[in-house]
Amino acid sequence: MPRLLREINDRAALELLLTSGPLTRGQIGELTGLSKVTASQTLARLEERGLVEVAGEQAGGRGPNAALYGIVSSSAYVAGLDVGPEFVTTAVADIRGDIVAEATVAPDEHDDPVAVVHNAVVKACRSAKVALSKLRAVVIGTPGVVDPRTGDVRFSFDLPGWHEGIHEALARDLRRDVKIENDVNLVAVAERTLGAARGADDFVLLWVGRGIGLGVVLGGRLHRGRSGSAGEIGYLPVPGVPLAADVRAVPGRLPSLAGGLQSLVSAETVTELAASYGFVGRNAAECVAAAVGAGERGEPLLDDIAGRLALGVASVCVVLDPGLVVLAGEVSQAGGSTLTGRIEEAVARICPVRPQVLPSEVDGNPVLRGAVLAALEQAREEIFAS
């Protein structure tokens, strides 16, 4: 029992210092409910483990200044990766969550995924002057379905080289546990921590870019489904478009996605749709941004896109009733609140549930931000439990 109490006290102090530090011994005792003696013993143990250090002083009234204790940021590091068909970007963060380095590599189409990830991680670690052995967690965000049993990417249109056995091979190569997660799920993680869904226990995140995907958070936890396929909303049957012809995974051939919601609102479709309304750009984001900037002339295109997206949003909401829908991806960034407001109205016309629909608020690369946050959660849990 004494050992368990020590572990509980150590964890409480570490969590507090990570979220609110640096703090004095008295503040730690007051906020955790520990006595001064127990708080002192806890800090001594954490200092001995190299997790906590004196980070300064706080001037008081009478008597000497009180020492401020903070987390040793260099005590552990994590890596988050955003893996795509053209680039692999790695961010290395210290245990406090501060990004200390980012690096991007462009893999050759024939490169082995293990070698690509290894090179990306090593490049980022060298840039940060952090030894690979200091990484406590590595989380990789990829498009496609991740099998929850094996941790492998089951199939991905963008990453045909990521096959069964890659997860285990990565762990062997990097000599540590590696987690592969669907990229849209990681965007949802970032949105709940940093963005429009801060503090929300139930919400869905709809990603609209080159492809379309859905991240589902229920009760504060990602819902991946039994096979890891929860959120593959591109396959959703919708009126007016053909069904996805053949979604069976056959060796040597990727499953088809020529129908369903994907064919209504993919970036390619949005670009073609915009041209029919007189808006031309290099990509869907430029077309949508042009429509937003065009005032009344752009409203018909925005209404059309919102109506198409509303079919997917309404289908999700009548099943899950999440209350909040966050729109992310390049189309979301371009459309902003002008587009999400239209989606909310369109959903209310066809669905008895009216969710709040908001644009993403996560800056930078949301997949990378989510991967780092997931890695931090894993690393901190290991430290708390050790």
Image: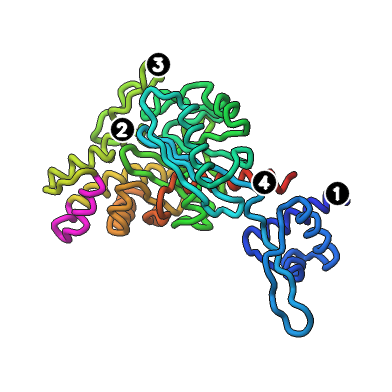
What distance separates the C-alpha of mark 2 from that of mark 4?
40 Å
Query: In the rendering, at what x and y percent does residue 219 appear?
Result: 57, 48
Looking at marks 1 and 3 on the same chain, the residue that comes earlier in the sequence is marked by 1
Q: Magenta includes 261?
A: no
For the residues labelled 1 and 4, say whether their Cβ atoms are less than 8 Å apart. Answer: no
User: Which residue position is annotated with label 2?
Assistant: 260
Looking at marks 1 and 2 on the same chain, the residue that comes earlier in the sequence is marked by 1
Looking at marks 3 and 4 on the same chain, the residue that comes earlier in the sequence is marked by 3
Which of discs 1 and 2 lies nearer the camera? The answer is 1
Determine crowd level at label 4: few under 14, some 14-19, many 20+ residues with C-alpha closer than 10 A.
few
What distance separates the C-alpha of mark 1 from that of mark 3?
53 Å
Towards the viewer: 8 or 344: 8
Determine crowd level at label 3: few under 14, some 14-19, many 20+ residues with C-alpha closer than 10 A.
few
User: Which residue position is annotated with label 4?
Assistant: 381
The numbered disc on residue 250 is 3
What distance separates the C-alpha of mark 3 from that of mark 4?
39 Å
Towards the viewer: 65 or 176: 65
Identity of the residue furthest to the top in this view: 251
Residue at horizontal 64 percent and vertical 58 percent from the top = 18
Residue at horizontal 66 percent and vertical 55 percent from the top = 72
Q: In this figure, what is the number of numbered marks?
A: 4
Determine crowd level at label 1: few under 14, some 14-19, many 20+ residues with C-alpha closer than 10 A.
few
